[in-house]
Image (cartoon, rainbow, N blue to C red):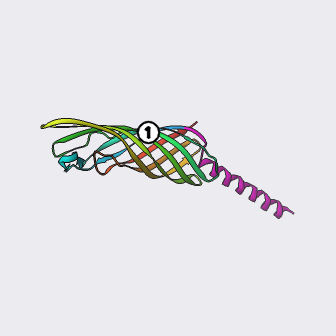
Amino acid sequence: MRKQSSWTIGLLLAAGLMSATAMAGGDTGIYVGAGVGQASIGDIDLGSDGSYPFDGDDTGYKVIAGYNFGVIPLIDLGAELNYIDFGKPHDNGVNIKADGVAAYGLAGVNLGPAGLFAKAGFIRWDAKASSVAGSGSDDGTDPAYGIGARIQLFSIQVRAEYEAFDLDGADDVDLLSLSALYTF
């Protein structure tokens, strides 16, 4: 009789730990956070004048606000807004200052406290370029997407992600970042 009770208690504890681990992976609700990483900008499109060879990078950062719907167990569905500052990349005597606001839809898979996610949306961006020859600016709204991995314990999440932006004014605009978030 004692052996059967020990097995029952053990199974109940294991089930409780598994459900706690699954819950730790997908808090539902509003979250906020910030991230920092490497922002890169490739060749600049000059319209009818062709393109200008550019390969600059700098430290970029972002501020994040979002909502995880938590509709389906083991699946994360959410919406997110990011303010992204691409820093001030420079190359070949040209300096660029770019930033934008991105809106994403997110979908992810919970693997306990760890998970994988993908996101897609749009960025409303603004960029200013300057050199000894002069300066100019451009802006627009273009597609944005990303993939990442995350670890979450209770309401704190740390994630690494790669985001790419299909901007009309430049090739290969991306951000590789590490972020920390808190879910309320």
Say if 14 sits above or below 157 in the image.
below
**Which residue sits at x=82%, y=59%?**
5
For the view shown, which residue lies furthest in the right direction?
Answer: 1
Q: Position of residue 11 (x, y in %)?
A: 75, 59
Q: Is residue 178 left or right of residue 137?
A: right
**Which residue sits at x=79%, y=59%?**
8
Q: Is residue 45 left or right of residue 93?
A: right
Say which amino acid is labelled 1. Asn
Q: Position of residue 139 (x, y in %)?
A: 31, 38
- Magenta stretch, main secondary structure, is helix
How many numbered callouts? 1
Q: Between 105 and 20, which is closer to the camera in this rendering?
A: 105
Element at badge 1? strand
Specify start and end residues of the magenta stretch as a single range.
Answer: 1-30
Q: Is residue 138 left or right of residue 115?
A: left
Q: Between 160 and 6, which is closer to the camera in this rendering?
A: 160
For the view shown, which residue lies furthest in the front direction?
Answer: 48
**Which residue sits at x=27%, y=39%?**
88
Q: Between 169 and 54, which is closer to the camera in this rendering?
A: 169
- The quarter in which the C terminus is drawn is top right
Q: Position of residue 51 (x, y in %)?
A: 20, 50
Residue 129 among those drawn in magenta: no
- The quarter in which the N terminus is drawn is bottom right
Q: Is residue 144 left or right of residue 92?
A: right
Residue 9 among those drawn in magenta: yes
For the view shown, which residue lies furthest in the left direction?
Answer: 133
Crowding at dot 1, Cα within 10 Å, few <14 / some 14-19 / many 20+, comes out as many
**Which residue sits at x=31%, y=46%?**
168
Say if 156 sits above or below 11 in the image.
above
Q: Which residue is mark 1?
A: 82
Q: Position of residue 138 (x, y in %)?
A: 28, 38
